[in-house]
Amino acid sequence: MALDPSVVDSVVNTNFKTMAEQAAFATNQQMQLATRAMEDSIQDQRDSRLLSKSVLGSLCKRIVETDIAEAVANAKNATADLPNREVELGAATALSEALQVALTSIAQVLVKAAQTTPPETGSVGATIAK
């Protein structure tokens, strides 16, 4: 028994409609995901700007609210230890120079020893096998 052509046409139309709706649904889902990603990116940029403005504002507030006498005292405290640091740096520089001189001297001795030591030509007790 053969199928009625109207039934075949109805099934074909239903299948076509289902496939077309699935493609449209998938495209719609992709668009929604892309839209959400773009919205999240924009929100991240806004949050970043807000954070940077907040940090800059707090720094500016600290600069404006800092008393001149307090700022001068802080600068003096920061530089008060400089003479001691200069002495430490000078001592470290002198030690570095002494080490460099010692290493140069050792290197010269080793080079001289390498130039004046005759090469070893054979080992003690070596025999020639015939």
Image: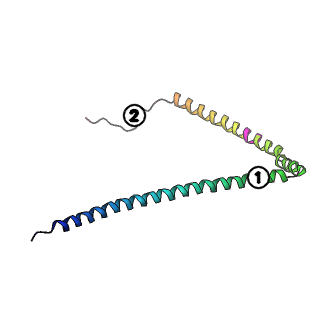
Q: Residue 66's spot in the image, x, y percent?
A: 85, 52
Q: Secondary structure at mark 2?
A: loop
Q: Identify residue type, mark 2.
A: Gly
- What colouring method underlies this structural image? rainbow
Q: Quadrant of residue 124?
A: top left
**Residue under numbered circle 2:** 122
Highlighted range, magenta: 90-94
Coordinates of residue 77 in the picture (x, y in percent)? 85, 50
Seen in the picture, residue 12 relative to 127 is either above or below; the reply is: below
Residue under the image location 27 percent in, 65 percent down = 14
Prevalent SS, magenta region: helix
Q: Nearer the viewer, residue 127 or 4?
A: 4
Q: Read off the residue under disc 1.
A: 59
Which sits earlier in the primary sequence, circle 1 or circle 2?
1
The quarter of the image holding the N terminus is bottom left
In magenta segment, residue 107: no
User: Quick check: 2 left or right of 50?
Assistant: left
Q: CA distance from mark 1 to mark 2?
A: 78 Å
How dense is the environment of label 2, judged by Cα within 10 Å: few (below 14), some, or many (20 and up)?
A: few
Number of numbered labels in the structure image: 2
